[in-house]
Image (cartoon, rainbow, N blue to C red):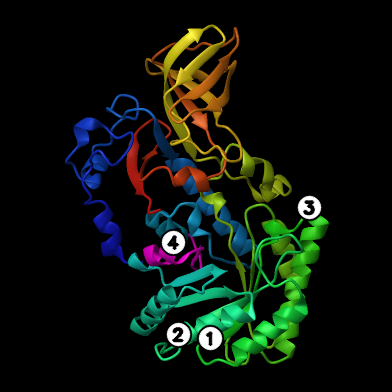
Amino acid sequence: MRREALARLAEERVDHRFKGLPPDADGLTVGELAAQRRDLFTGGFTTPVLTLSAEHLEHNLRLMQTYTARHQLAFAPHGKTSMAPQLFQRQLEHGAWGITLAVPHQVRVARAFGVQRIFLANELVDAAALRWVAAELAADPSFRLVCYVDSVRGVELMDAALRGGAQRPVDVVVELGAGEGARTGARTQAECARIAEAVAGVPTLRLVGVAGYEGEVPQADGERVRAYLRRLVALAAELDKAGHFARTDEIVVSAGGSAWFDAVAEVFAAAPALSRPVLKLLRSGAYVTHDDGHYRELTPFNRVPEEGAPEPAFRLWTQVVSRPTAAQAFANAGKRDAAYDLHLPFAQVVHRDGAEHAATGITVTGLSDQHTWLATTEEADLAVGDWIGLGLSHPCTSFDKWQLIPVVRADGTVVDYVRTFF
């Protein structure tokens, strides 16, 4: 990655654009503020403020580095989770092959910070974006981008946009759909073969493998997910036998969200040898922060506890602003601050006068635009002015609400700030 681009993030001035940061820090650079090592609770931070645990981030990065190495998987974590180049850099430093992304804007962000290998887990048919990709490939011989194709029409559109301007062919993988009613991807092996033939017929594209997303398998369970992944591996073998990978030095076989990567590891380990070396590419992204809801329930580490366990790195701090009855309280975070598409936040701890206690008897029952609705029992020790630490579900819809996120040590010291680009 481009160190100078990352360094410039520390030169950005702190001001009103960034929620939760101390008002008296206006005019400081992010780097200057980080160097002050302020305390989250006494350093002037205002609520609501989303934080990342320094220790849990590092734990999760190391955990997946160890897991993928143990299972001989290449790793391209999905960057759409965080859209944070500083985290991309740390993922690459922890052994990632590259970064997965979903749409052209995200690719542009990654390239602005020098990411050299990008897996675009989507079909790219936007002519302007394709011309930009062609220019990037021409300008940087070390840059590699791989993207999906899932239709002959898509191949035609890509070729039309690239023809006459592409100095290097764009690498593509045929996407196999996860079944009827699933999301994108060709639905049959025969359709995949037709797409491969179409790619072979144009000079602007190069077929390098197959890919899919097992998280979209209808009524997903272990048996159905493994059956789909075996279909994906069989497709790679079928296309290889037909000679469709003659123009590449390695064959990409890619899958892996954050709920079934243990099944991916198992099925890919049993894959037959092909005519060329196989890049077995996992793409899970939510692990970097994990969560206190959706992925806590779904993570494959629940099925293989001997492999370790991720730790939730997010905590949203909000302040009690109203306690109208003994059974109800309101805090000042809402839908604009907290993920709520899969689960409501979870009340975890109460901070008062430098001490913390468990949020016993406190339940989040709803979110308004700028209020958290709290139900409280007789056990609840809660007063106006208290800070409440909330656990969140679904990292992808947590990151996108915050442009600059403090990274906090367990003792409350803020040691860094993560910049996002959504």
Q: Which residue is mark 3?
A: 219
Mark found first going from the N terminus, 1 or 4: 4
Label 2 and label 1: CA atoms lie apart by 9 Å
Quarter assignment of residue 231? bottom right
The residue tagged 1 is 205
Q: Secondary structure at mark 1?
A: strand
Q: Secondary structure at mark 4?
A: helix
Image position of 208 (left or right of 22)? right
Whether the magenta-drawn stretch holds residue 95 is answered as yes
The stretch in magenta equals 94-110
Which residue is disc 4 drawn over? 93
Rendering coords of residue 303 (x, y %)? 74, 48
Residue 250 seen anywhere in this rendered image of the structure: no
Nearest the camera: 25 or 131?
A: 131
Answer whether residue 13 is magenta in the image: no
Q: Are marks 2 and 1 in contact (CB under 8 Å)?
A: yes
Q: Which mark is residue 162?
A: 2
Q: Earlier in the sequence, mark 2 or mark 3?
A: 2
Decide which of tag 2 and tag 1 comes sooner along the chain. Answer: 2
Name the residue nearer the viewer: 19 or 316: 19
Residue 166 in the image: above or below residue 21: below
